[in-house]
Image (cartoon, rainbow, N blue to C red):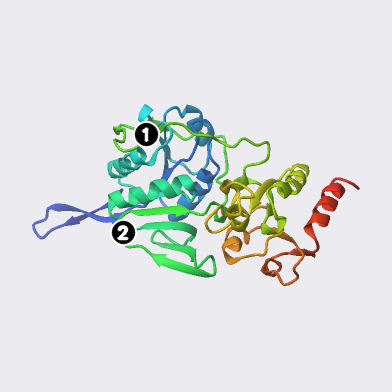
Amino acid sequence: MFSISQLRNFQGRNVFILSHRFQSTLVLAEHNNGKLNPVTLSAITAAQKVGGTVSCLVAGAKCGSVVEQLSKATGISKILVAENANLHGLMPEPLAPLVVATQKQFGFTHILAGASAFGKTVLPRVAALLDVSPISDVTAITNADTFVRTIYAGNAVLTLKSNDGVKVVTIRPTSFPAALMGDAVAPSEASTQTVNSSPNSEFIGQELTKSDRPELSGAKIVVSGGRGLKSGENFELLYKLADKMGAAVGASRAAVDAGFVSNDLQVGQTGKILAPELYIAVGISGAIQHLAGMKDSKTIVAINKDPEAPIFQVADIGLVADLFAAVPELTEKIGKK
């Protein structure tokens, strides 16, 4: 991790000094013990912009298939594998000390993960244990010390320079393309770190919402509804449209707060940050909080009966119409020549 310079002192003896610390990044892989989350591939791309070597830590109860998937990603020098029953459920309490111990063992200068619920839970704990300031939701990396992130719900861009010895960073996945998959296989090695169970928390189980639609964070097409739908039952209009387009369904915070849909569909500053190929906003006024989560979409279509709705300011295509008439008509005509 250090370059060594050789000098001769006044007595003619060789003196070696540590003159520069090479950059090396540890990427914390996100997965469900069976499938790698694509956010990790974006984190690998971000890590490459730091410079130096990139290693990945795959931690879990049984993560052999995840290691196999990750090993084909380009730009990785090695994969560290920590399999332990205490990591079942990937609770942050045992995981954060493992990340810190791994950093100290190899001397990583940077620790990266996606700015997902997983990354936002684990990395702040890692930063606290290392006594450094976490750098969250980064959208660009200028160099090893300088990072770019948005503030004020995306209305301002902040460039910051960190003087911490170890940079702990979560990156916005939509701002970095996924690392390419190649034929070469990155080497893996078992972690030698001890994983202790947490005395304060225990993983009991989880209930996951199952859907045939694409996962919201990674979908290429997203159809989102707002308070203009007036009820949860009316979201059925969006479900039919989404199913015909092969799209995921999202919602504004207003719709979630009103109880129309569950909060795992929320798009916005306090929900999911998306950048799909096509984003269709139905009955969404366009509050700043919502725009922060979708304004980077490649094409934005807005359907709203209010011509003064702020959503039209960011929309590429706008339709001023009653959604209860427009959406069924759109659903019917999609696929027809």
Q: Secondary structure at mark 2?
A: loop
Residue hosting label 1: 202
Q: Nearer the viewer, residue 197 or 219?
A: 197
Inspect the image, locate mark 2, and give the three-letter code of the amino acid beneath it. Answer: Asp
Q: Residues within 10 Å of mark 2 (few under 14, many from 20)?
A: some
Q: Is the residue 254 above or below the residue 121 in the image?
A: below
Q: Nearer the viewer, residue 137 or 21?
A: 137
Can you name the residue that lies furthest to the right here?
337
Q: Is the residue 231 above or below the residue 163 in the image?
A: above
Inspect the image, locate mark 1, and give the three-letter code of the amino acid beneath it. Answer: Glu
The percent position of residue 78, horizontal first and vertical second, equals: 42, 38
**Dot placed on the residue nearer the N-terminal end, 1 or 2:** 2
Image check: 205 left or right of 306? left
Image check: 43 left or right of 8? right
Q: Quadrant of residue 82?
A: top left
The percent position of residue 200, horizontal first and vertical second, equals: 31, 38
The percent position of residue 149, horizontal first and vertical second, equals: 48, 63
Q: Residues within 10 Å of mark 1 (few under 14, many from 20)?
A: few
The percent position of residue 247, horizontal first and vertical second, equals: 71, 45
Q: Secondary structure at mark 1?
A: loop
Task: Report the Cα–Cα distance between label 1 and label 2.
Answer: 32 Å
Residue hosting label 2: 164
Q: Is the residue 249 above or below the residue 323 in the image?
A: above
> Going 82% across and 48% down the picture, which residue do you hit?
331
